Amino acid sequence: MFAKAFRVKSNTAIKGSDRRKLRADVTTAFPTLGTDQVSELVPGKEELNIVKLYAHKGDAVTVYVSGGNPILFELEKNLYPTVYTLWSYPDLLPTFTTWPLVLEKLVGGADLMLPGLVMPPAGLPQVQKGDLCAISLVGNRAPVAIGVAAMSTAEMLTSGLKGRGFSVLHTYQDHLCPEGRQLDIKKSSYKKLSKFLQQMQQEQIIQVKELSKGVESIVAVDWKHPRKGSFLEGSEVRTIVINYAKKNDLVDADNKNLVRLDPILCDCILEKNEQHTVMKLPWDSLLTRCLEKLQPAYQVTLPGQEPIVKKGRICPIDITLAQRASNKKVTVVRNLEAYGLDPYSVAAILQQRCQASTTVNPAPGAKDSLQVQIQGNQVHHLGWLLLEEYQLPRKHIQGLEKALKPGKKK
């Protein structure tokens, strides 16, 4: 039903009376849900919107959106949960299992044929023709589609599992899923759409053009643009991923070293060509992939100053020895600025301590970066300054091994 783009007729906040009616309808449609679960699904005070739309075949559908996520949709006075809701309540509907490769067909609008079913050891769930059912993938309990049974379980078995089994209404990754990711401009700091678009264009996230007079259109989106977010250390990322896997019962029951991938983890870490083939990953692979998907950054904290946070990976302070005119050696140090150090101050300290001339020049091949040059092999004095005075970690300094050995001339 949502395999192709739909047309939105209206999007309005739900009224109090309609909210109460929706709760009553959910209780009637899904009697296995307790009172607390119904209140959790249809919250009393949180924002809840009613989106009325027309599917690509012309069907009038009402979608209920909570917290920016579609939770229910109504078609011909029948209420259906979305896959997003089924992730929170996986036992809400009888669930049938199919192979991962079948999902791509379902997302494209195909119904589920009986040859695609996987027969579990306990047998198929008992359903009647017309019953609402969930569809999941082998190795993953999270439902990825919902559909209506085209025949009863008994008829499915009698047919030898041949023919159409389910009329699929909604799937993970169809057009209803993106509908949940919305931004209410009026409630943001931008207030107006024009200001929001202007800011997004300045950050090179989107490209906007006036294709017709007075009408601005988004003509390009940089989906790979880095998003802003909280800064996390690697250990914190690992803790979050481990807790998420355990909370959602994703640790494989037969092999504790493997983690089953639910739709959220699939979206986060798998490549497009892996979406329907990779169902489990070892812990180390899962954690490595999660870290690789994050924007690297580093923080430099100096005494009495606010921490400095920058994107990318920090380059080590680089100490080298070079030959100059008359075969004279000089010590060159680069990348001091990345650690909040002023090259001119470092040069002045070294000049006094080493009793040698120092110069500060632009670093070759590095934009807006300076290097300090000291006459002679002064790596020992540099090491003292960086390690003892500035308390920099040794792992962020390369070239300390070039220090003059005792008894040798500079």
Image: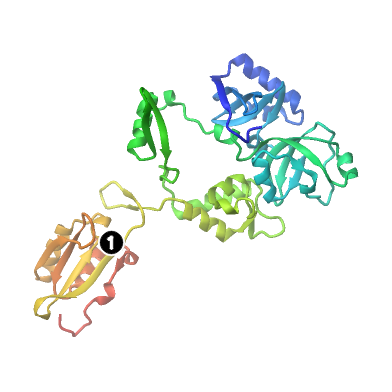
Crowding at mark 1 (Cα within 10 Å: few <14, some 14-19, many 20+)? few
Q: How is the image coloured?
A: rainbow
Q: Is residue 35 visible?
A: yes
**Residue 36: image location, x then y, percent:** 68, 29
Viewport quadrant of the C terminus? bottom left
Q: Residue furthest bottom?
A: 407
The foreground one among 382 and 54 is 54
Q: Amino acid at mark 1?
A: Gln
Residue position marked by numbered label 1 in the rendering: 391
Residue ID at (54%, 51%): 269
Q: Which corner quadrant of the image does residue 107 belong to?
A: top right
Residue ID at (71%, 22%): 76
**Residue 3: image location, x then y, percent:** 63, 36
Q: Which corner quadrant of the image does residue 337 belong to?
A: bottom left
**Residue 41: image location, x then y, percent:** 64, 29
**Residue 215: image location, x then y, percent:** 39, 24
Residue ID at (61%, 45%): 263
Residue ID at (14%, 66%): 350
Q: Is residue 149 left or right of residue 266?
A: right
Q: Is residue 237 left or right of residue 66?
A: left
Could you tell me how many numbered marks the image carries?
Answer: 1
Q: Is residue 167 above or below residue 237?
A: above
Q: Is residue 195 left or right of residue 267?
A: left
